[in-house]
Image (spheres, grey):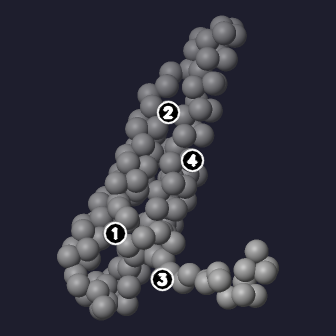
Amino acid sequence: MALLEKLNLIKTAHAHCDVPCGVYETDSAKWAAETCMKMVEKIQGLQPPAAGDKQAMADYSNTMVRSIQVKEEFAKICKDQLLILWTDHFKPEHLQKWPELHDKIWKATKQCSVVKRTVKMEEAKKLQDMVKEIAEIFAESKKMVMR
């Protein structure tokens, strides 16, 4: 490999993003936010078993832990997907058209953390609404002609 580089047979490729243009989407963030809502709903609906029923308590605890784990995992997925859009898709031209975009994404990624540390439906719904709003901007941004 070093010999090929010295012979100048290998060229370094440069790209302005991590993935080919046009691959970006908001479905993953929307799906992740919806999953968080479903997990909050499931957690809030769990009923603790009667005292002394060890098997029911084990099953309850297992379901609770798994539901929390999924909620946390998908809140992180949502945050990651929003940050990918922010760092790789959105350009200065988008900020000119939507000057509030930075604030919207910043607040939405912060909301992902709120959803991770709480079990409140209003917080999960707030995240879902924020992601929907960013997705609408994203859809409009794809219609813009970039230089």
Nearer to the camera, 63 or 122: 63
Pair 1/4: label in front: 1
Position in image of residue 137 (x %, y %): 27, 72
Q: Residues within 10 Å of mark 2 (few under 14, many from 20)?
A: some
Q: Nearer the viewer, residue 8 or 55?
A: 8
Please name the residue that numbered disc 2 is placed on.
43
Q: Which residue is mark 3?
A: 16
Mark closest to the chain's N terminus, 1 or 4: 1
The tag earlier along the polypeptide, 2 or 1, is 1
The residue at 55%/51% (across/down) is 116
**Label 3 vs label 2, nearer the camera:** 3
**SS under mark 4:** helix
Q: CA distance from mark 4 to mark 2?
A: 12 Å
Answer above or below: position of 40 versus 82: above
From the image, tell me which residue sits under label 4: 72
Give x and y (percent) for residue 76. 55, 55
**For residue 22, which numbered disc appears in the image?**
1
Residue at left offset 43%, top offset 49% = 32
Q: Mark 1 to mark 4: distance in Å?
A: 29 Å
**Amino acid type for the residue under numbered disc 4:** Glu
In the picture, the quarter occupied by the C terminus is bottom left
Residue drawn 35% across the image and 60% down it: 26
